[in-house]
Amino acid sequence: MSIEEFIEELTKLKIKPTEKELKDLERYCDLLIEYNKKFNLTAIKTKEDIYLKHFYDSLTLAKAVDLTKNIKVLDIGTGAGFPGLVLKIFYPNLEITLLDSNHKKIMFLEEVIKELDLKNIYCLNSRAENLKDTYREYFDIVTSRAVSHLRILSELSIPYLKVNGKLIAMKSSYEQEIMESTGILKKLDSKIKEIITFKLPIEESNRTLIVIEKEKETNQIYPRSYDKIVKSKF
Ligand code: SAM
């Protein structure tokens, strides 16, 4: 996707990028390409692919939630910053926490944040199941792209949402995962509110945003240890 195509697609998401946002994004892209040669942060390596499959794709979260509000967002398994760091560039009003268990990815994110002088954005080098003593009932939105089965992701994220907060899982396919998540969603007092499907421009691959709302405070037994989460069946 060229920069012109990127800008055109953003207008359909009601995003009008400023010069500064585009410049910050370009610098982020350059740093990603440079660091990727040393640290293998992402399989997507060309500028055109980065703009389409990382930058544009991250911003499609705007289809599911009003990002112009002053809300707290957690991005679980952010990798090289998708979608969380891209959201921060376009929505400086958001308080964003980027979480990843991989140290080198967090080091890269800290470098980009410093270079772009972004404020009110935090990096956590930890596993999602280990946040329970610090971030319980804290975030308005938890999002995650391409991290784990919805059944596992739900338990790793819903405990950190406020009541009425939303988990927005960014996926390609979804039917099977939703079927296998009904049991745990009930236990986590949460319901699927919306499923938004669309195609990525140009390459036309399927995308889905699964929007899950938390209705009550989460039982303190969740999240369980990762082993238990994975072993317990639907
Ligand atoms: N969200 C990014 C994207 O879409 O490009 C990265 C996706 S990558 C396939 C999955 C990432 O999740 C990896 O960087 C991995 O280190 C991280 N991850 C997996 N399980 C995790 C957990 N339990 N807690 C924190 N990070 C996790």
Image (tube, rainbow, N blue to C red):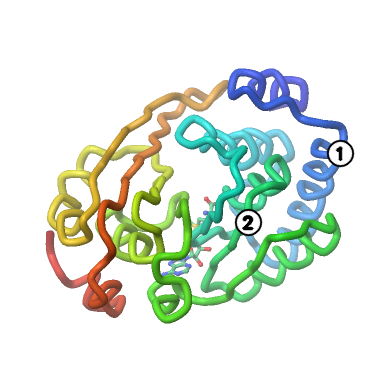
Residue 176 left/right relative to 9: left
Q: Are marks 2 and 1 in contact (CB under 8 Å)?
A: no
User: Ligand 1 within 8 A of label 2's CB?
Assistant: no
Q: The C terminus lies in which quarter of the figure?
A: bottom left
Residue drawn at 42 percent across, 57 percent down:
147
Give above or below for 132 relative to 58. below
Callout 2: few (<14), some (14-19), or many (20+) C-alpha neighbours within 10 Å?
Answer: some
Query: Disc 2 versus disc 1: distance between alpha carbons?
Result: 19 Å
Q: Which mark is residue 9?
A: none
**In the image, residue 146 lies at what x, y percent?**
44, 51
> On the image, numbered disc 2 is attached to which residue?
95
Q: Position of residue 119 (x, y in %)?
A: 76, 59
Quadrant that contains the N terminus? top right
Which type of secondary structure does the marked residue at label 2 adopt?
strand
Q: Which amino acid, by three-letter code, is at mark 1?
A: Lys
Residue type, mark 2 in image: Glu
SS of the residue under disc 1 = helix
Q: Earlier in the sequence, mark 2 or mark 1?
A: 1
Instruction: Tell me which corner region of the image, top left, top right, bottom left or bottom right, holds residue 219.
Output: bottom left
Front residue of this view, candidates 184 and 217: 217
In front of the other: 140 or 198: 140
Residue at image position (78%, 59%) is 112
Q: Nearer the viewer, mark 2 or mark 1?
A: 2
Check disc 1: other Cα within 10 Å, few if <14, some if 14-19, many if 20+. few
The residue under label 1 is: 20
Q: Position of residue 232 (x, y in %)?
A: 15, 70
Which residue is painted at 73% across and 25% down in the image? Answer: 16
Q: Nearer the viewer, residue 210 or 66?
A: 66
Q: In the rendering, at what x and y percent does residue 49 appear?
A: 65, 37
Image point (29%, 80%), residue name:
225
